[in-house]
Image (spheres, helix red, strand yellow):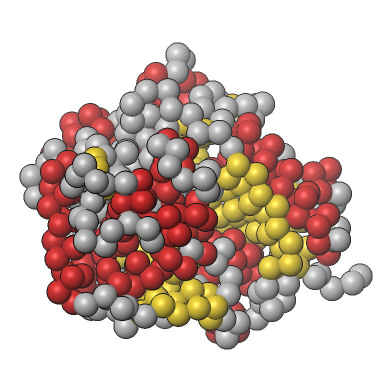
């Protein structure tokens, strides 16, 4: 039997689904991508159609295999990475969802979280998280309470729940495997990250029956195999990780002290702390970076909700961008003396503010302000949010980074990365493979089946594409950042 030639990564993101093939040198050899609909039923509500996501998963995977000229027999394994806190509930008998997926950006359960505020210290000690509608538990409970008969069916064992990875795994395996990995479980508010298991007290607190939840496995593990009729033969599923943890792996941040920042739909900074779960004093999250051979590695994470989605809004909402790629060129036409600030709190503010009720604003407009000023303000807002996260990490003991490894869709934008270097005051490094989320999923699956020899071997394959040095003076940098902090305070509904 010929040796496998690739690993297939399924990267199910917030706005699209991507399938990528990686060879033994961890280089991408084929990719297929399809966007899916964003559904906004009410202010602060965000939903996806799980069936549309499933169709895109199969379609893009088949397309990537066809582009790569590969059959199922040529693929060593499948790795899955996913938009994390987004949840689905489905019927075990049919696999049919009982409600649209509630997306991580959704704010509908803010009031539930506020009612649970007296339990914050207990919840945070076990989960490393804050009480916020960002996370999965209140979303699951909302569906159980709002869909007629759902709670009774769940307690009877007729329903299954999970993050997107668990739903896709169920479908890929024909309903044989209901499982997730420790990184996704660590984002639910239901998982004790120290004991590495679902916590009965948390399940009771949030009103989620244990019967609906998946088994929690390592990030590189045996997750069964894809049904033969999907891709022309069975393919082992050997890796699962939430998108930011997968990107951390893809950036080869294996060592404690490593840091990466992803600019996708949101902005996510992850600082690896090693085998110790470090509590944050500055409203960051303590999370599982990955779990291998039953041993968890931990990280501090800061999450801002709107990065690429800010540029998408400038393009689609305001109509002042012909394309996302044009943002830097248009922003370069802005008058550098103006101080226009865009606070993209479209679905509230994430770390380090955690204000679910905040909403966006454009501040500092004058009569001579132009669309270019607003576009520049949008790009700068993403960079300022990254600095907010890095400032909180430094205050938690991470120190000031010598450089930032960045990835995600916005990392392809040279102009944005120069803004980032200027406003953070740190050199920025872009890898040759910017889709590190997909690469991380492939890496985990490849490690499990021996396609890749070790984490060290993967680290040796990391390659630099571009480096951006700060060119802005310190005084201007600090003055601009002070203006950003003042603008954020204008939209906050919770005191600092």
Q: Position of residue 370 (x, y in %)?
A: 32, 46
Query: Which quadrant holds residue 196?
Result: bottom left
Between 451 and 25, the one lying in front of the other is 25
Q: Is residue 28 above or below residue 369?
A: below
Quarter of the image with the N terminus in it: bottom right
Q: Position of residue 445 (x, y in %)?
A: 64, 65
Q: Residue furthest right?
A: 1
Q: Is residue 347 above or below residue 129?
A: above
Q: Residue furthest front?
A: 368
Left or right placement of residue 450 versus residue 487 in this view: right
Q: Residue at x 50, y 78 (%)?
A: 466
In this orientation, does residue 229 appear?
Answer: yes
Left or right placement of residue 97 versus residue 271 in this view: right
Between 403 and 272, the one lying in front of the other is 403
Q: Position of residue 92 (x, y in %)?
A: 61, 30
Query: Which quadrant holds residue 472?
Result: bottom left
Q: Is residue 388 above or below residue 143?
A: below
Q: Residue furthest top?
A: 148
In this orientation, does residue 246 appear?
Answer: no
Q: Residue at x 83, y 43 (%)?
A: 229
Q: Residue at x 34, y 42 (%)?
A: 134
Q: Residue at x 32, y 38 (%)?
A: 347
Q: Position of residue 419 (x, y in %)?
A: 35, 67
Please tell me how many numbered marks the rendered image carries: 0
Left or right placement of residue 87 versus residue 142 in this view: right
Left or right placement of residue 286 versus residue 245 in this view: left
């Amino acid at each position: 039997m010929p040796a496998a030639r690739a690993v297939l990564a399924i990267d199910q993101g917030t706005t699209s689904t991507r399938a990528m093939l990686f060879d033994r040198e961890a280089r991408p050899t084929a990719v297929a991508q399809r966007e899916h609909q964003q559904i906004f039923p009410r202010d602060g509500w965000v939903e996806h159609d799980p069936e549309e996501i499933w169709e895109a998963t199969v379609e893009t995977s088949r397309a990537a295999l066809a582009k790569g000229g590969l059959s199922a027999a040529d693929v060593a394994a499948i790795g899955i990475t996913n938009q994390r806190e987004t949840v689905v509930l489905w019927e075990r008998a049919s696999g049919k969802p009982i409600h649209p997926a509630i997306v991580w950006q959704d704010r509908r359960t803010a009031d539930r979280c506020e009612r649970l505020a007296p339990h914050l210290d207990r919840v945070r000690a076990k989960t490393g998280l804050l009480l916020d509608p960002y996370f999965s538990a209140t979303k699951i409970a909302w569906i159980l309470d709002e869909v007629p008969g759902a709670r009774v069916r769940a307690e009877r064992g007729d329903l299954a729940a999970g993050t997107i990875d668990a739903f896709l795994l169920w479908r890929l395996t024909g309903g044989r495997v209901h499982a997730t990995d420790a990184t996704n479980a660590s984002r639910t508010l239901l998982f004790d990250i120290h004991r590495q298991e679902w916590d009965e007290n948390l399940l009771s607190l949030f009103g989620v029956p244990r019967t609906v939840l998946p088994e929690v496995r390592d990030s590189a593990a045996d997750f069964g195999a894809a049904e033969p009729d999907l891709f022309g033969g069975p393919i082992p599923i050997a890796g699962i990780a939430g998108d930011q943890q997968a990107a951390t792996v893809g950036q080869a941040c294996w060592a404690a002290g490593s840091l990466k920042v992803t600019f996708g739909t949101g902005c996510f900074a992850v600082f690896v702390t090693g085998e110790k779960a470090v509590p944050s004093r500055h409203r960051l999250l303590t999370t599982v970076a990955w779990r291998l051979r039953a041993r968890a590695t931990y990280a501090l994470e800061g999450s801002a909700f709107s990065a690429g989605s800010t540029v998408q809004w400038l393009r689609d909402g305001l109509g002042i961008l012909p394309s996302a790629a044009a943002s830097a060129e248009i922003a370069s036409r802005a008058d550098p003396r103006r101080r226009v600030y865009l606070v993209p709190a479209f679905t509230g503010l994430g770390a380090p503010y955690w204000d679910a009720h905040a909403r966006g604003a454009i501040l500092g407009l004058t009569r001579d302000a132009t669309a270019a000023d607003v576009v520049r303000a949008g790009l700068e807002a993403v960079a300022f949010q990254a600095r907010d996260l890095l400032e909180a990490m430094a205050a938690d003991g991470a120190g000031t980074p010598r450089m930032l490894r960045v990835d995600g869709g916005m990392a392809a934008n040279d102009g944005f990365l120069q803004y980032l270097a200027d406003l953070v005051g740190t050199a920025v490094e872009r890898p040759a493979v910017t889709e590190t989320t997909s690469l991380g999923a492939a890496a985990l699956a490849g490690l499990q089946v021996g396609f890749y020899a070790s984490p060290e071997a993967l680290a040796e394959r990391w390659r630099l594409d571009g480096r951006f040095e700060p060119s802005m003076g310190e005084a201007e940098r600090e003055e601009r950042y002070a203006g950003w902090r003042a603008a954020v305070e204008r939209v906050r509904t919770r005191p600092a």
